[in-house]
Amino acid sequence: MPKAWIWSQCNHFNKPHTSLTMSVAVIPWGPATFDGFIVGLLIDGTLHRFATYTGARIERETVSKNNVNLIFTDRNKRLEISARRIGGGQLKAPTVTQMDRRISETLSSEIDVIL
């Protein structure tokens, strides 16, 4: 299980036929960890993919209690994501041995995307 992560998905945008999925995490890899991500923005049937394995990178990452701002870049594109947390609740989450960690999750966030 990742040490830390940001996960979002949304299919409610002003532009029809648009959806977003995003996962950014500190991923365990044997005794070490690495920062990894995968982001897919689907617009009118075209998938814009930004991921560690495609050579994309995170240009900027700002995370606070109520806001997440990320900029992803690859050779040809730039994707800016701004998310605002609204409401939410605490869920149980795993540690190495138990479900004794708490994470915050909400279904009421707002996400702005610029490609």
Image: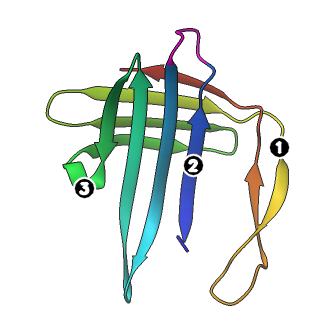
Question: What is the number of the mark on residue 7?
Answer: 2
**Label 2 is placed on what type of residue?**
Trp
Assign a secondary structure to mark 2.
strand
Quarter of the figure with the C terminus = top left
Which residue is pictured at 58% across the width and 9% down the height?
14
- Position above or below: 37 against 78: below
Mark 1, residues whose alpha carbon is within 10 Å: few (<14), some, or many (≥20)?
few
- Residue under pointer 1: 88
Mark before the other along the chain sequence, 2 or 3? 2
Q: Which of these two is toward me, 57 or 51?
A: 51
Task: Tell us which disc is closer to us: 3 or 1.
Answer: 3
Let me know if residue 54 appears in the view. Answer: yes
Mark on residue 53? 3
Task: Kindly report the secondary structure that dominates the magenta region of the rendered protein.
Answer: loop
- The extreme front residue here reads 45
Residue extent of the magenta highlight: 13-17
- Classify mark 3: helix, strand or loop: helix
As drawn, the residue found furthest toward the left would be: 75
Across and down, in percent, residue 92 comes to: 80, 68
Left or right position of 100 against 34 = right
| Horizontal side of residue 44 vs 77, given as left or right | right
Instruction: Label 1: state its secondary structure.
Output: loop
Residue at screen point 53% across, 29% down: 82
Q: Amino acid at mark 3?
A: Tyr
Separation of residues labelled 1 and 2 (CA atoms): 14 Å
